Structures are given as C-alpha cells and as structure tokens.
Image (spheres, grey):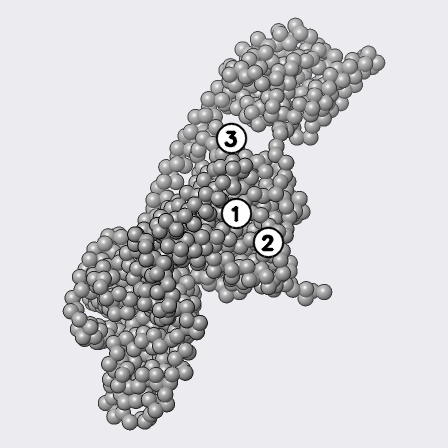
Amino acid sequence: MKPMNGAGIISDRDILIAVTINILGVYTLSLPRILAEETTAADGWVGILLGGGVACILAWVVAKLTLLYPNKSFFSIASDLVTKPIAVILTFLFTLQYIAITSFQVREVSALAHQYLFDQTPLEVISLSFLLVVVYGVCGSRAGIFRLNALFLPFVLVGLLVVVVVPLVFIKTENLLPVFQTDFKGYVQSTYSSLNTFAGFGIILFYIALVKNPKNTPKMAVKGVIFNTILYTILYIVCIGTFGNSTTANIFFPTFDLSRTVEIPGGFFERFDAFLFLAWTIILFVHSLMAFDIAVMTLMMVFKKVKKIMLVITLTPLIFFISMIPKDYVELTHIARYISLIKLTSLLLVVVLLWSAYKIKGGKQSE
Amino acid sequence: MRRSLFTRVYKKSTDQQYESATQQSESEFNIPIGLTLKENVEIIKKKLGDPSDLIVRDITVGKNKHKCSILYLSGLADQKLVNDNILKMVQTEISQSDTNSNQSGTGQSEPNANPSEASQSEPNANPSEASQSEPNANPSGTGQSEPNANPSEANKNNPKSSQSGGTQSDPNLLETIEQHVIAITDTKKGQTLYEVINAILSGNAVFLLDGVNTVLVMGTTGYETRSIEEPQSEAVVRGPRTGFIENIDKNITLIRRELKDPNLRFDVHEVGRRSKQKVVVCSIAGIVNPDILNEVNRRIKTIDIDAAPDSGFVEQWIEDSFLSPIPQILDTERPDHVTYSVLQGKVAILVDGSPFALIAPVMLGEPLQSIEDYSQRWAIGTLLRLLRFLSIFISLFLPAIYVALTSYHPGMLPTKLAFSIAATREGVPFPSIFEALLMAVTFEILQEAGIRLPKAIGSTIGIVGGIVIGDVAVSAGIVSPAMVIITSLTAIASFTTPNYSLATGLRVLRFGLLAAASILGLYGIILVFIMMCIHIVNLKSMGVPFSSPIAPYFLGNLKNLLIRSPIITLKKRPPYLEPRDINKINDGGKSK
C-alpha cells in the first residue's frame, strides 16, 4: 500500500480521462440552455470555441506551474512560493469551493432524477443515497478513483455518442439560421459561460502531483480540454438544430432532453432515456467523487495528522445540508453561477499569484 | 486504506503466533535420535500412540548380524516397494556379505566404503571412535545440550554394541546400506525424532540401525488414489479431458507432462499445523514477475491453521479482501488451465488433498473465460465470450430491472407490453418485489437441494421445481407468468459462468440489486452498479488491480478479454502482470 498522497500512482493518460470526465460533469446538461439564453440562433458555438481556447491556455499554464515542483502537493508548492499562511488560505479556498461543487452535483443529480425518473420520491432520499455512494468511493484508494474513471469511460463515451449521433436526423436547418446575429456582449458572455464549464480542468492542480511521469501531462490536460471543446460544439449545434434557440433556452436540462428524442427501433423500450440516465449519473457521480476527494485532499494537506475517514465523516453531513439549501431549480441555477464565478476567480488568482511569486523569486528554489 | 490497515495488523499478529507455535511444536519433538535401536523404536511408538497400522520389522544386516528395523505405516506406504526394494535387498545383503566374508576373509564391501578406518580400527578403537564420530554428528544435529548427555549414552551403548559383536564403524554401515543395498532412489537422512515421525506419517519407510543416531528415510509413499477423470466442475466439449485429483504429486506430474520447460518451478510449502500438507506454488522462472511470486510465497507462509481440507481454505487465507463477494483467486480443476495461466505469467497453487488448483492473480474478466475458447475457432470463441458477458448481465440485473420497471417506471415499457404484463399480474396478491424475492429464494433452494441430493433422485428436483413451482404457482395465481420467465432466464444465464465460485458470488449481489430496485427503482440499480464498480476498482488480486486491463487499461490486452481474437494475434502476455518476458513465442508466423 502506497502512502496516502504518494506520487506515481497514476499515468498521464489517467489525467486525460479525468480532465475529460470532469469537464463533462460540470454543466454539460445545462450548457446549451445558458448559451442559448445569451446568443441568438446557433451562435453559441463561437463562445464555446473561444472559451475552449482560453481554457486550453489556462490548463497548460496551470499544468506547467505545478510541474515546476514535480510530485509536490499544491500546498507545499504554495507555501514555498508565497508564505505558509497565504498557502493555507488558498488551500481552504479550494476546499470550500470543492465542497460547494460536490453539494451542487448531489443536488443536480437529485433534480435530474426527480424530473425524469420519479417525481414522488423525496429529494432528500435521492440526494442522500447518491451522496453515500460518493462517500463509499472516496473511502477507497485514490488510485481507485482513476481506475474508476477509466472503467466508466466507455459508458460515458457511448452515452454521449448516442446523444449526439441519433438526433442528427431531427435537425432542422432553419433552427440554425441566421448566423452571426449576436451582439458583441453576447459573445463575451457566452465565452465566459463556456469557460466556466471548462474550469473543470482545475483538478490537475491537485492531481498532477500523483502522476508517475509528468512530462507529458500538460499536453494531456490540453488534449482533454480540446476534446471537450469539439464535443460541446457538436452537442450545442445538434441541440439548437433539434429544439431551436428559444426552446433550448427554456428547458432546464436540454442535453438530457436531447437524449429523450432518441427512439430505439423495434419498440421494446418506449423510452431510451433510462439508459442514458445511467451515463449521466455516472458522469455526475465521477465529477462529485473527484470534487469530494479534492476537498478531503486539500484538508489533509493542511491537517496532516487527521485521518481521511474522519474528514469524510465530518464533511458528509455538511455537504448534504449545503445541497439542500437551494429551494428550487431557479435558485440552483443562480448558485451554479456563483460557484463557477468563485471557481474561475480562485483558479486565476492562484495562477497569477503563484506565477508572479515564482518570477519574483527567479525560479531559484525549484532547481 | 482502512482495509489494508486491518489486514496488516491481522497478518503481523498471526505471523508472531505462527512462529511461536511452530517453535513450540518443534521443540516438543525436537529430540535427537538416540543410539539404541530398541529405545528409538519405543519412543516412536509412544509418540504415535502405538498405532496398529505401524509396521515394525526387525531384521539383522551384515555378517555381524547388526540389528536394524524398518518402520512404516501400512496403509500409507507402498508395501510392495518396501518388501521388494528394501526388505528383500537387506536380507540378500546378509547372505551376500556372508559369502563375501567366507571368500575373502575380512569382507570386500567394507574397505570400499570405509577408506581409512574400517579395517585398521576394527578390534580396538571402539571407544575412541565413538567419541570421534559424535562431535561430527553434533553440529549438524541439535545443539549444545547434547555433549553432556552423549558421553553417558555412548558409554551405555558401547558395551552393548561390543556385546552384540558389532565391531564395525556404524555411520559407515548406514552409508553402505544406503549406497549399495536400498533400491529406492528417493532417500534422505534424518537426525531428529520430528523428522522421522513426520516421514512415517507421510508414508515413508524409515530404516533404523542400532548404534547409529542417524536414520534413513526412504520415499515409499504410495496409497490408493482416485484415477484421473474428467473434471466435474469445468466440462468442455473440445479440449483435454484430464482433471486434477487429490494427490499433489500426481497433479504436479500432470503439469510437468504438459510443460517440458526446464524453467518450470515448484516452490514447496508446508501448511496445516496438524495436517502438514504439502502446498506447491507453480510458476515459470523467466516469465513470472518475481514480485507476484514472492507475494504469493509470503502469504502462504502466514497460513496458520490446523488443516486445509481443500484449496478453498488456502484461498480464503491468502486472498486480498475477505469481505468481497467476488473471488480474487481463480480455482480450476483443469491442468491445461493451469499451464495456460502459468505461461501467461501467473502463479498456480496446488494443495495436497484438493483437486482444485488456485490461480493468482486473477482479473475481472478471467473467471468468465473458459479454456475452451482457445480450442475453438476465434469467431465462435469471440461470440461465446460476448454471450457470457450478456448472460452475466442478465443473471445480475434482470430480476432487478423487472421489479424497477413494473413498480416504478411502467411508462418506460412499450404500452402493449406494459398492458400485457399488468394483465398477467392481475390476480397476483403481492407487490412485484415480493414476487421476485419469492421466486429467487425458491430457485436458490432448488439449486442447493439439487447439489445435495444423491444423483439417483436428482431428477426429482427437476420435476418438483419445474412443474410444481413454475406451473402450479402461476395457475394458483401466486406469481405471474412473466416472473417465472424472468426467474428461469436468470437461472439459466447464471449457469453460463464457467467459474463456479464467481457464479455463487454473484448470487449474493443479485439480491442486493433486487433490494435496491425495490427501494429506488432504476436509480437504485444504477447506484448499486456504481458501488459495484467502486468495489471492483479498489479490489486487488495479489497486489495487481483487479480491474485490469480495463482500468488501468491496456488497449492491446482487450482483444483477449472482451473478444478472443485469432491465436496468431495474441503475441503478448498480459502487461498488467509485468512479466519478465512480455513476448510470447508466438510471433504470428513471421519468423519463417
């Protein structure tokens, strides 16, 4: 058994998979709605591409930054560059952020299940059962989480493929027109929104320390972002082409509704969405699992002597209560925006702070 | 982490226990063999409780009529071997040496065997020789307490031996007998009572010579064993019909017969404090990853039990997680399966008394593979593998999905199907979860009864199960016909799993899924599925991740897991085992 935050337990291919799934987990379900609100017709793809481009650069920078100190945890890097108190504050910032993300995911799953699977079962039961499974996952080994990613990847890819490919026949070209009618502000907003989605690559800040041979990891992280950019672009165009801009803007989970248009020939199952629900649950699950794990990991960086299981037990009720705070879907959407704002700002803050500190110190300490 | 902590503490304590225990039992028996024949035989008899099947044959050897005894347990040793190759040879030796001594006076055989001492020191040097020869024997034998005890013994002995006329140097006589008389290849020497008694209990014959504190142990083990038959639990249509039997030496032979590789290695262990069973770890040096081999050997050394009636005991002792319903070590009755696995870079464990060999490490998809897949052509092999994946899905999920769909999501079924199912459930008084549990439990009972019943009345179960439970239960309106279909399909699908241990493990999970489906419908099934996946990725087999090669994934190896690609494309050994030599000899026929 390797030490808890021991280096070298994963390969850089695992980072690629983790980044891909993690970005997918954030707002894939609701992204078309957000973009459709901000842009006209199918112009949101411009925002996705721009956002993806910025995210690529950011991911590369973050990866490079962590690689200055190979196989060292975020906390030790930060306390090396900026002083220890600031490092503690930064680490706590991420802890809070990932706790919030986990809560949000838990709530989102229950919202999804509530809307599409059963409307009578209480939200609390759905959330709690989901959260307990997440806890079970976090209690396992960290390498196990990455193995889980790899194990789930086929499900996710097949699910997404079905979602993207099958509705192609329903696309109406008039939904996609006219082109480039959005004003400048719309583009900026949509870029910002899609950048929020791509901020899921933030996990590399913490997970790169575990990579066995981290030379190619920045490339892998960027590849993950690029893959998602392409996927989102296609997904958005298919979504708008199928539903039209105004319908998309009014569906809470447009991507999921897209999968409901899928009909299986042969008529054995009336609705196929139950099986796509599996793919979506898995995506959301893996995302919240990693978020929870990072929350625990960041806490363990600061409190070195506390046992993992104790932290998990303490955090679980906290996350559950936070996830129950939003009253309805509207509040959930608002909270989602705040979370992504915090997420992006903290990421930028850390990158800028650490880079400048590194430059001021002249990079001598890393040698 | 919590698991590892637990097992680590657990193993450490057992290590200590084991050490102290073995020390104890060895010190109890760790008495050196004395010089007096009669006393030695008496001690052995006493230690064994004077059993009726202990054969003690007293004879004399050599021209000096030296006293000696042959001891063995009648049922365990091959009596013909003892009679023809030991007893008869020793007896003829007497007559031969008699004639020899008549012809040449002093005896020819002795000067050959005793280069310096024999002829010269015969008459006068007895006391001095005894004192000389003993220090030689001591360091190898027992320790320091002896020199104090020995002189007195030697003093006691020497008069006796001189009385009986044994004027020869005794250790050399034993040497001569071993070299020239005994017609058995497997001989060794024992110094302590512990060794001797163990040898007797293992079926060996023991040759004791008066005035010598060394004992000749001869491998005469030979008892009735079952003949080699077709394996019961893993039947194949095409492939060898040999199966392991309960005798470990025969099983080793079965493996050796298939692999004439000089690198084939068998590491021998002894397991069971009372049963003293032989456990053999089989591997091929140069292929197997030494880390895995060492880990297996280390874990087997920690085993501390009275006896292991079956290899299952060893399996449960050395497996990584005893809480898991999934077996992390494969069991097989087929020598060809063992040779195939060993060639892959795995390790096989044979336990004396069990016809089931263990194979480790084992991965997620491997219990679903039959060795026959490789005997068949690749297309059908591939199809069968996919079919097994499908049937394992059915056997796990079908009852749960039925319950979830009928009780939570009837809208997901096509309208007509939903109506027809609803119509058949019309008169059924129970909710579908109860119905499913009823049928599932009934099936488990039937299956268990079918195994325990004598074969002659086994068919009764088929009639009772098939007609009474299936037909009558439906016409009585207790269960719906759809449920009977689901149950029987599940049952049949579960029988396609080639490995019985996995099939039984999955039976447990099926009930878990049923419970989840009855509480949370499809969502519950998905959550349990995720939990199963979490469990699997955290599971290890001998330290190798159980979910390999899917996660961490090795794309090249999937062609031997999901499908069975043509033999000529299977060029590599599984990379997750990190074998010493990753390339098989098979290079697709390119090296012509």
User: Is any part of residue A237 visible from this angle?
Assistant: no
How far is the residue under mark 3 from the one under mark 2? 35 Å
Which numbered marker is on residue A139?
Answer: none
- Give neighbour class at mark 1: few <14, some 14-19, many 20+ (Cα, 10 Å): many
Return the chain for callout 1: B
Q: Position of residue B278 (x, y in %)?
A: 54, 35
Q: Residues within 10 Å of mark 3 (few under 14, many from 20)?
A: some
Q: Position of residue B271 (x, y in %)?
A: 49, 34
Location of mark 2 (residue): B372
- Spatial CA distance of label 1 from label 2 is 17 Å
What residue do we see at 65% from left, 26% from top? B78
Q: Which quadrant of the structure image shows residue B99?
A: top right
SS state under label 1: strand
Tell me if mark 2 has few (under 14), some (14-19) or many (20+) residues whose alpha carbon lies within 10 angstroms of its own.
some
From the viewer's perspective, tell me whether residue B532 is left or right of residue A327: right
Q: Position of residue B126 (x, y in %)?
A: 65, 12
Nearer the observer: mark 3 or 1; the answer is 1
Work out whether mark 3 precedes mark 1 in sequence or the reverse, and give the earlier one. Answer: 3
Is residue B145 among the parts visible in the rendering? Answer: yes
* Image coords of residue A326 (percent x, y): 17, 69
Residue lying farthest to the front in this orientation: B475
Q: Earlier in the sequence, mark 3 or mark 2?
A: 3
Residue that numbered label 1 is attached to:
B359
Say which label, 1 or 2, has the lower sequence index: 1
- The amino acid at mark 3 is Lys
Comparing marks 3 and 2, which lies closer to the viewer? 2
Pointer 1 and pointer 2 on the same chain: yes
